[in-house]
Every structure is written in C-alpha cells, then in structure tokens.
Image (cartoon, rainbow, N blue to C red):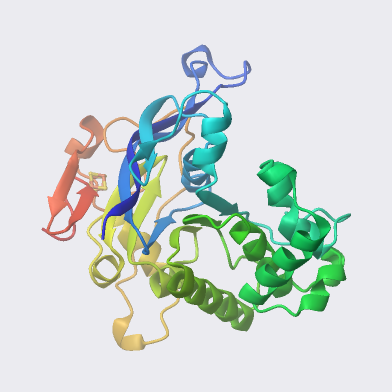
Amino acid sequence: MSALLEVKGLGVRYDAPRILPFAARHGVDAVLDVSFDILAGSTFALVGESGSGKSTLGRAVMGLAPFRAGQIKIAGAAMPSGGDASLVLWRRQMAMMFQDAIASLSPRLTVRSLVTEPFDIHGFRQGLRARDREAECRRLLALVGLPADFAERYPHQLSGGQARRVGVARALALSPRLIIADEPTAGLDVSVQGEILNLLRRLQDELGLTYLLISHNLAVVRHVSDRMAIMYMGRFVEMGDTAEIYADPAHPYTHGLLAAQPEIDPDKRREDVELMGEVPSLAARPSGCEFHTRCPRAQPLCTEQAPDDRNIGQRVARCHFPLVS
Ligand code: SF4
C-alpha cells in the first residue's frame, strides 16, 4: 500500500488580536511541525483535548486553514499554490464531514439539493441537469442507506443519525479518495454511533476510501483507526499503531487520556493517572517540554529542554522519559 496523503513539517499560525501582550502579537501557532502519512484505504486518527489543534490540522489538509510552513501531497501531487482551477481540481480528491451534523446542513435546502450541491459549488459540468441530479441523489442516498423519498425532506425533519448520513452522502458526491471526518459521532446516541461507524467502515471497504478521523472519543478511535496521533498544543506527542498505543502508551499525556476513559473490563483498568490542571495558552507556551506543567513524571530537565521525537519500535513519542523504551 502506498501513502495517499503525505504531510511534512506543517505549521499553521493565526494572527493574534492586538489586545495580547506585545510578545504574543507575532501570532499563535495552532499547529507546529507536524508530519505524517496515511496509507491508501486506511484510517488515521487525530486525538487530543479541545484546542489541541486537531480540527485546525484537518482544515489545513483541506486547504481551509492557510499554513505558513510545510507541504501537503495527495496521491504524490503537492497542493498547488494560489487559488486557481488546479487547486480546485486537487482539492476535489478529498471531502470533509463537519462536526455538527444538523447545523452543517443549510435549513432552507432539501436533502436533494444538499447532497448534489457539491456539483454546483465545484462548477462540475456547469452543475447537473435535472435528470442527472435525480439520479445522483438516488445513488448517494442508497450508498448511505437512506430511502429515495428522503430527497424531499429538510434538515429539521431528520434525526441526528439521518442528518449524519446526509452529511456522508454530501461528502461522497464528487467521489473523493480521502474523507476528513471531524467528530463523526458527536451528539449521537451510542447505538446510532455504532450505525454510523459501521456505515463508514462499509463505505471504506466498498469504495476504497481513506479516512482522516478527528475525535476526542477514544472508544471510537480504538474501534475504527489503524494508526493514530495524539496532539498537544499543536504538536504530535505520540504517533503509531492504534492497537499498540492503546496496549502500552509511551507518552505520559497519552497515558493520562487513556486512564481517564471508562474501561468496561476491570482487568484492563489502568493505574489512575490524572491529568493535572488546564492546557496552557497557546500565546504563552511553557519552556522545555510544553506538557511539563501537567505531567506527573516531569523532572528538572523537562522544564529546561524540549524533547525530540524518539523512535520506540514502530512508534514515535516526544518525551525525555517515556513509559515504554
Ligand atoms: Fe513529562 Fe518530561 Fe516527558 Fe514532558 S518530557 S512528557 S514533562 S516526562
């Protein structure tokens, strides 16, 4: 299998508001020096607390958050610079499923318009003729397991799970190769979450899709991803095979996140390692290891020197004193 998506040294910086102290006015780094590949047909998950930069990274891959450093390639082709037609064509290879299933659907449009709108937005054959639009709508609704008569409905007439299916159909409209799924099960009942995850898995098998999954739900990540990265203050602190990381986390932050998850099997319950305090402000990054203000294993070295990426088997962890060597 070859890499469908390649990200090298990506950095995203937002302009800072003028009310910030002078030292912070150069901007706020939401994503810093991030590199990863996603193999075609596989699922890669981004995990982290709110504000860790995972959604910004997903948006940057889509070209929706301007990045100041790094390179993004899809199927070996680098993102074209400038906003011309080549960028539109390049971007057509991927699609994004946004977080809030119902809010992300325009309330004034029918399901038919919603799922076929991407053809209009991308100037595809100057939009679709009415007969083609009907055929595309039926095809897309069938793909996501919705009856054809749902085409007449409006978003307020859909349940959360049905709205999420419409969001998936809309993402599939232009036959992308990569889907960026931002919190695909947020706000859904557990049983409906399972249905949506099974749908995504089935579509991956049938259409050979590649997923970049963004989630703070570790149970979902464990269920569906092949590889994962844990983000803290815009950096990857651990990256590797999902099963390996769940079995034996190397970074204290990963360990803390996993320990905070309810574990159904008491034999697998982890030693309780509570994450202390809050995530510091991105405008005032701590010295040395940026996690030292919350880390139960912090040593004097951690406050003085930033750790480098350390290879641990097939994994990479950014820590002076990892839990696995
Ligand atoms: Fe904790 Fe030190 Fe490792 Fe940072 S480098 S995660 S502070 S042990």
- Position of residue 208 in the picture relative to residue 169 (left or right): left
Q: Position of residue 169 (x, y in %)?
A: 65, 64
Relative to 306, residue 50 above or below? below
Q: Position of residue 36 (x, y in %)?
A: 31, 46
- Closest to the observer: 76 or 273? 76
For image coordinates 51% across by 72% down, the residue present is 203
Q: Is residue 166 visible?
A: yes
Q: Position of residue 144 (x, y in %)?
A: 63, 74
What quarter of the picture does the N terminus occupy? bottom left
- Closest to the observer: 242 or 279? 242
For image coordinates 40% across by 31% down, the residue present is 11
- Position of residue 203 in the picture relative to residue 246 (left or right): right
- Closest to the observer: 214 or 296? 214
Relative to 278, residue 167 above or below? below
Indicate the quadrant where residue 182 lies.
bottom right
What quarter of the picture does the C terminus occupy? bottom left
Q: Position of residue 265 (x, y in %)?
A: 37, 87
- Position of residue 296 in the picture relative to residue 90 (left or right): left
- Closest to the observer: 29 or 275? 29
